[in-house]
Image (cartoon, helix red, strand yellow):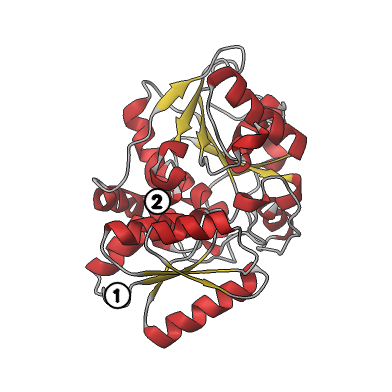
Amino acid sequence: MSAPDDAAPTLRPAPAKRTGPRIKRSDVEDARRRIAGHIRTTPVMKLDQQLVEHGYVKLEMFQHTGTFKARGAFNRILRAHEDGQLDPAVGIVVASGGNAGLANAYAAAKLGVPATVYVPETAPPVKVARLQRYGARVVQTGTDYATAYDAAQQETARTGALYCHAYDQPDIAAGAGTLALELGDQIDGPIDTVVVAVGGGGLMAGVATALDGTARVVGVEPEGAAALRAALDNNTPTDVTISSVAGDSLGARRLGDIAFETTTRTPIRSIVVTDDAITAARSLLWDQYRLVVEHGAATALAALTSGAYQPHPDENVVIVLCGANTNLNDL
């Protein structure tokens, strides 16, 4: 089916002359085979018709560590082991005190590989403690993510550890895309549209690649963290200022190269929503469905609840609820 007429201005693939690393559907299929048995097949639930006529939510917040990122973490480590790029004695390095750090620390522990996670000195003690419970060595340095990232890169170069990026590596993005392949087994009939939240774009790139030619993808961002919109407007990944209630999980300062390359060959619609819309969508999921999600996950649903994206009456829509690592006190 065709997209709504008012969607045309935002269906803007960027010029193909600038391309970055590319993933293919076969990469996503390989990832699904590779991580089988290590990740959960997360359920799908139908939404009430009052919310959307033909709508489902993919409950990816039930994934290990409460986030889809476990898929890419397992795929990255297992693929590196297959290719002889992983020294099991040295292990992996990641810079992230958030979902990516947790997912990679968990995957490394399950696979018997050491993990070192770099975080800023300002990282919340509860996150540091959780990383340590997964067996990771946590190194706190500097006051911002950039400093932690630089330190992680230095350790990688010094030790030969495997670096696991939060979103901008082919194996990470391909692993994320495996949730889209699951949808084909879980939903009867065609899937027209899959709605995902966008930070650095790894999830968007993986899903769009898995569904290329069969379904459209809508990427949703907060106004205060709109890296996808900035990349489309400027025809290149561009730094943005982060100021959003969802910034803890969607706070990438620029769209990843893999995600941008995906926009050059896949018509991804960009939607931007307000923090108020995100908070309202998160509250709705708790009040009506007793589903606990982080603000980043609620961002995808906010596109529909705010009216920013209005499906056709016969359009089959899946909203990915990508994570649940949140503070329960403000539900």
**Residue 85: numbered disc:** 1
Decide if residue 136 is on the left or right side of residue 124: left
Sort mark 2 into few (<14), some (14-19) or many (20+) by Cα contacts within 10 Å.
Answer: many
**Image location of residue 202, percent across then percent down:** 51, 54
Quarter of the figure with residue 113: bottom left
Which quadrant: the C terminus? top right
Type of amino acid under label 1: Gln
Q: Is residue 187 left or right of residue 146?
A: left
Q: Which mark is residue 200?
A: none
Q: Residue at x 44, y 51 (%)?
A: 69
- Mark closer to the chain start, 1 or 2: 2
Q: Is residue 284 visible?
A: yes
For the residue pair 229 and 73, the one nearer the viewer reads as 73
Which secondary structure, mark 2? helix
Q: Which residue is mark 2?
A: 70
Q: Is residue 213 above or below residue 122?
A: above
